[in-house]
Amino acid sequence: MIDSSSPAEPLFGTLAIAGVGLIGGSIAAAARRNNVAGQIIGIGRTASRLEAAVDAGLIDTGTTDPAVAAEADLAIVCTPVDRIVKDVRILASVLGPGSLITDAGSTKDSVCKALTDLDGANGPAFIGSHPLAGSELQGFEHARADLFHGRLCVITPTENALPDHTARLEQFWHALGANVVSRTPELHDQALARTSHLPHLVAAAMAGSLQDSDAQFTASGFRDTTRIAAGDPGLWVPIFSHNTTAILAALDRLQAKLKEFSDSLQHHDTCALQKLLEEAKRNRDGLG
């Protein structure tokens, strides 16, 4: 069923998606449902997986040859962050002037700095994107057309980005149902270190410290807190590596807060402990 807000005509003639997993598959599903693209091409490394995505109705064509996407108006790279720059370069080598390339990676500063020359002046333009949506689940089998509905998407245009390219990208994510904000790549990485990367690190540390004998006692508190630790380590190692400085700063802030808790416990300071817990509750309740 097409959203009532869907355009009468597709925004883009051809949409190419490199990496048809959970995020790439959900982009394809949302683009199809909302009439965002006339044709959707999936690009990947495993032909059988791409054929399965075609059979599932997510993409029209699946290919291991990026050259097939030469006519795409918009290309989105949904591969791990340590592959994004290379994959963008490959697409840029086949796409023509006027086309736009973006990504869906969780880190932005190093990626955008490496691709500043793709300004659209003599070829395709690159502007970074990060939809704040996802799951610990993997694969296009878990793709959802509503994954981005009401969720935040951060775009990170650099100083050389042309306003019309930025506007087209905003329009694309809006058409998928996302709320769009613009930030510099550096500010994006600092914020995500605190709100996404650090939580994953903490969840992994908690899950990793679990003793086998305690597993039977894990109820909703432990399981909810560590859910994201079930994410693919192969995706998270590059994220941590690409955003190390900001994550370390966020970790320092957390360790300072943990010390406040530790001090209140050691000194049996129930007043301080109450204030810390009240502060935490206020912040959490304020998220809505």
Image (cartoon, rainbow, N blue to C red):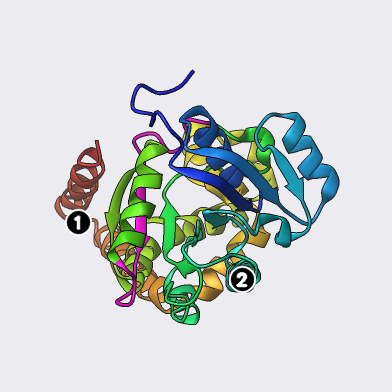
Locate residue 25 relative to residue 242 in the image: left or right. Answer: right
Q: Is residue 147 magenta?
A: yes
Locate residue 278 relative to residue 117 in the image: left or right. Answer: left
- Crowding at dot 1, Cα within 10 Å, few <14 / some 14-19 / many 20+, comes out as few
Q: Can residue 281 be seen in this view?
A: yes
**Residue 216's spot in the image, x, y percent?**
64, 34
Q: Nearer the viewer, residue 240 or 264?
A: 240
Q: Which amino acid does label 2 sit on?
A: Asp
- Crowding at dot 2, Cα within 10 Å, few <14 / some 14-19 / many 20+, comes out as some
Query: In front of the other: label 2 or label 1?
Result: 2
Is 12 located above or below residue 243 in the figure? Answer: above
Q: Nearer the viewer, residue 226 or 131?
A: 131
The residue that appears at 65% across and 34% down in the rendered structure is 58
Q: Can residue 21 be seen in this view?
A: no
Magenta region: 145-162
Q: Name the residue under label 1.
A: 269
**Residue 147's spot in the image, x, y percent?**
47, 35
Q: Name the residue under label 2.
A: 82
Q: Does the magenta stretch include residue 103?
A: no
> Real-space Cα distance between discs 2 and 1?
46 Å
The residue that appears at 43% across and 42% down in the rendered structure is 11
Task: Tell me the quarter of the picture where residue 234 sits.
Answer: bottom right
| SS of the residue under disc 1 | loop
**Residue 125's spot in the image, x, y percent?**
46, 68
Residue found at the far top of this picture? 1
What label does residue 235 carry, if any?
Answer: none
Main SS, magenta residues: loop
First in sequence: mark 2 or mark 1? 2
